[in-house]
Amino acid sequence: MNITNRLFAYPVLSDEKDDYKDSYFNVNYEHTMQGVNSLKLSFDISMNCCDLEQLIMDGKADYVIHLECLTTAYREVLHSVSKHIEHIIPIGRINGTFDAVAFVILKKNITDFFCSDWVDDFSDTTFNLFAGSILAYQNLRSLDITKDYEEFTNAGSIFSIYKRITKGDCPAEINLDSTKIRIGLGTKDYNVYAKYSVKAELQSLFHSMLILPVLVYVFEELRQEGGEETYHNREWFLALEKSYAKRGINFMDEIFNPEKTSYQLAQEAMELPLSKAFDQITIFFDTTEEDL
């Protein structure tokens, strides 16, 4: 929601306009990953217009940050009277281009508003402004939040699911000595998997049943003494390492994080697949019926 070529019937403070002589409204904007699953945004606001600051101090205006991701339809508005604003967004809510705009916005109607720093065109003018009026704004740089979680959820990326010739029910097997993490299913289980794994509504269920426990096993193996040395040249290890690096995280540092279990790490890496699987279960049942 960037402000472009918008006309205002009153002076607005912005580096894209020349309504003020010396005043400025500037916002420094930084983002960092908070763990694997959250994006932390930090906004530091600089403004030297006493008249606008007085409106904020009097409770008549706010600093406002508008956040929007067109790809996912995520939209959120942050209000603050502080010049430092921090906000954490679950990474699952955004993907692709992510936009932010900073404002000073009126909370209440005001009459006869005047600022001594307006240019000469407005030197003898006052304005009656309504709640919601934009008093200042800055378009902030767009972020490209391109996520690549195929490493953790796509059986065709670093995981290989194959059929073992067996009779009846039997345990699945895991093999880490190949270029991919190989998951061997017995004949009966594999036939079911091959038939239904192509259905989009079942993806999170299969991810939770197959990929999640295997990833827990992988992380536990890497935590063992000599684990990194054993597997560091495997293509699946390099893919995982690269995926974490994209998010500014050292893969092995995260693996050895004493505050997280391998089970927690695997869920975070896959963007909480259990929650998605539970959501998908409701597809197969009539949720309008009361629980017995």
Image: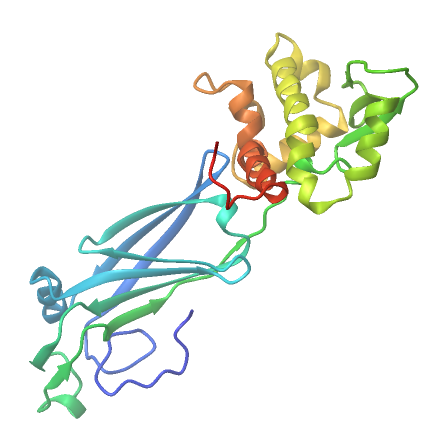
Give the residue at x 86% y 15%.
168
Left or right of 123, for residue 203: right
Residue nearer the viewer, 228 or 163: 163
Task: Answer above or below: position of 134 versus 43.
Answer: below
Q: Quadrant of the N terminus?
A: bottom left
Can you name the residue that lies furthest to the top here? 225
Q: Nearer the viewer, residue 26 or 75?
A: 75
Is residue 281 positioned above or below 74 on the image? above
In the image, what residue occupies the spot 28% across and 63% down? 26
Q: Between 272 and 91, which is closer to the camera in this rendering?
A: 272
Using the rendered image of the protein, determine whether residue 253 is visible from the camera's viewpoint.
Answer: no
Image position of 184 (left or right of 262): right
Identify the residue at horizontal 19%, vertical 75% (top origin): 22
Kindly indicate the quadrant of the structure image that contains residue 123: bottom left
* Residue 133, horizontal then vertical, whole percent: 23, 75
Whether residue 146 sits left or right of residue 292 in the image: it is right
Compared with residue 49, is residue 97 higher up or lower down, i.e. above or below? above
Task: Indicate the position of residue 282 as horizontal and vertical percent values.
Answer: 57, 41
Q: Position of residue 272 (x, y in %)?
A: 54, 34
Colour style of the rendered protein structure? rainbow
> For this rendering, which residue is in front, 153 or 232?
153
Q: Can residue 218 be seen at all in this image of the molecule?
A: yes
Q: Quadrant of residue 58?
A: bottom left
